[in-house]
Image (cartoon, rainbow, N blue to C red):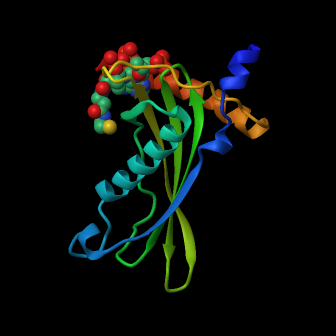
Amino acid sequence: MNYSEKKNGKNPEESKAETTIVMLPSDANPKGNVFGGVILKHVDLIAGLVAKRHAGHANVVTASIDKMSFLKPIFIGNAIILSARINYVKRSSMEIEVNIQAEDLDDNTIVHAGTAFVTLVAIDKYGKPTAVPPLIPDNDDDKRRFQEGETRMKSRLNEAAKV
Ligand SMILES: CC(C)(COP(=O)(O)OP(=O)(O)OC[C@H]1O[C@@H](n2cnc3c(N)ncnc32)[C@H](O)[C@@H]1OP(=O)(O)O)[C@@H](O)C(=O)NCCC(=O)NCCS
């Protein structure tokens, strides 16, 4: 990486985000289970926020969300805690990892409910993909996530090419 890339780059810490949302009756089926689509909506929103923080002025759109599993049921009255960070940047595309936890607010127990990998692409005012600042890994964990993100990006693009 040359000096100007380093100067213009950002590290993952600069864009990370966390949010906690209480699940309401309108988020769930008649038995009280929160809809997967509601969780995905919040995953998409926070991933978009992280990508926008990284991209700066450019608009960002969701290109894909990797296959994900809902590991635990989430009910009306639970809180979902979403933690999101950027793992990998190619040119215009960014991989955002969203960790999903569910909190039972009656007893404050927290369980891991799933992990989502969302790819967002920065676009210019004409809707064309545009480069974002390079990602500068700050520590060993950032470097490992960057490499794993690169591997996942290759495989998701291979899968996308088959459709
Ligand atoms: C995402 C989108 C901008 C890609 O545009 P495109 O003309 O196909 O662009 P390209 O093939 O040149 O790819 C641009 C970048 O997107 C990445 N990309 C394209 N399809 C992808 C996919 N399915 N998954 C992950 N990344 C993808 C490419 O790898 C490339 O990344 P790079 O610039 O970092 O190398 C375009 O398909 C689009 O606008 N889709 C609709 C997005 C949308 O409406 N989302 C929901 C609302 S936010």
The image quadrant that residue 11 belongs to is top right
| Location of the C terminus (image quadrant) | top left
| Location of the N terminus (image quadrant) | top right
Residue at 24% from the left image edge and 71% from the top image edge: 26
Camera sees residue 128: yes
Pinpoint residue 137: horizontal percent, then vertical percent. 72, 32
Pinpoint residue 12: horizontal percent, then vertical percent. 65, 39
Residue at 44% from the left image edge and 64% from the top image edge: 72
Q: In this view, does 64 lie above or below 90?
A: below
Q: Is residue 27 above or below residue 129?
A: below
Camera sees residue 161: no
Q: Which residue lies furthest to the right in this view?
A: 139
Q: In this view, does 25 lie above or below 8?
A: below
Tally the numbered discs: 0
Residue at 57% from the left image edge and 27% from the top image edge: 89
Pinpoint residue 142: horizontal percent, then vertical percent. 71, 37
In this view, the residue in front, 25 or 115, is: 25
Name the quadrant where ligand 1 sits: top left
Left/right of residue 142 with respect to residue 85 in the rendered view: right
Pinpoint residue 104: horizontal percent, then vertical percent. 49, 78
Residue at 47% from the left image edge and 46% from the top image edge: 49
Q: Which residue lies furthest to the left in this view?
A: 30
In this view, the residue in front, 45 or 108, is: 45
